[in-house]
Image (spheres, rainbow, N blue to C red):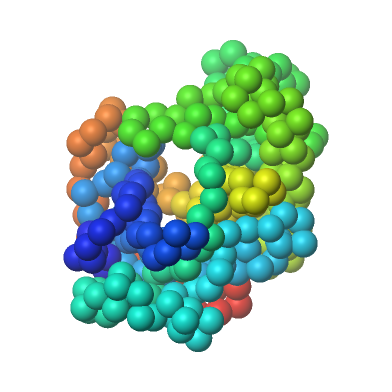
Amino acid sequence: MIIETRMPNRMHRGKVRDTYQLTDDLLLMVATDRISAFDVVLPNGIPDKGAALNGMSAFWFGLTEHIVPNHLVALAESSDASPYAGNPIMSDPAYAEDNVARQAMVVKKAERIDIECIVRGYITGSAWGEYRRQGTVSGKEMPAGLVEGDLFPEPLFTPTTKAEEGHDENMTDAEVEAMVGAEMAQKLADTSKAVYLYAHDFAKERGIVLADTKMEFGILDGELILIDELLTPDSSRFWDAEGYAPGKSQPSYDKQFVRDWLTAQGWNQEPPAPELPDDIVQQTAQLYRQAYHRLTGQSL
């Protein structure tokens, strides 16, 4: 389980991913087994989580590249990554000893847009909480009478800030436009919703309801591309279609299981987070494996 690799020269440590610079134009992005909830990294990790996120992101990058290009060059454990095997990062002893290749991909270096591009197809999570309090989602008025898990008439684009520490905050349309300009703001919204709708229909055929997801984008050679992860159990809510019914919490294949356990402990959602007991760790790991298998048709 990779919580902290022993590899040198780490360029960036995110909540879940570690990034290393391979060349001026390429990065090695490692999906660790760390898990975060409510924007706080938990003290212990989830076995196979990094491999699931890495493989699933690559799967979706391949399926959606007709909608928008992405940063993926090669999975680190694939033969396509062999030209980079002699790089000091990938040839470091810790790379092999920590089995990093299984959880890593070689990606193009892009200029990140510091916005979490969230698309919501169903009302749940923080959106449901806001709606119950004031009848809005991300500050926008919603129809009366919605119940938890209801399908929105059309997907909502509800962007937030991207905080390295602490909680992300909702962004208004005006705030997004002020950051990136009106044209790019519209492109982010349209592209995010197009990827969501495509993935929603794909997942539905495999017995999974894609309730919502978040994406990140960057600019490379003047072009908008997808970066980081895509449509994983960390960045999305995957519900079991067979058990889906509005008006209740839905059976899921994502880290909602961990959020529910943490909430039941009375945790205030501020660091430090409580350590997960072994049975919660193992059950969460199994949910990630199941999500990976149902969507990709492959086993870890």
Above or below, 85 against 261 in this view is below
| Quarter containing the N terminus | bottom left
The outermost residue toward the top is: 134
* Nearer-the-camera pick, 152 or 216: 216
Viewer-closest of 174 and 93: 93
> Where in the figure is residue 153, as x and y percent of width and height?
80, 34
Q: Quadrant of the C terminus?
A: bottom left
Which residue does the image show at 60% across and 31% down from the upper left? 159
- Residue 299 visible, this angle: yes
Residue closest to the far front? 24
Q: Give the x, y percent position of residue 102.
A: 39, 75
The residue drawn where x is 30% and y is 73% is 88
**Snapshot quadrant of residue 127:** top right
Q: Is residue 213 visible?
A: no
Q: Quadrant of residue 91?
A: bottom left
Judge left or right: residue 98 versus residue 35: left
Farthest residue to the right: give it: 153
Q: Is residue 13 left or right of residue 186?
A: left
Judge whether 272 appears above or below 177 on screen.
below
* Residue 293: x %, y % from top left: 54, 73
Residue 295 % position (x, y): 61, 68
Q: Nearer the viewer, residue 176 or 231?
A: 176
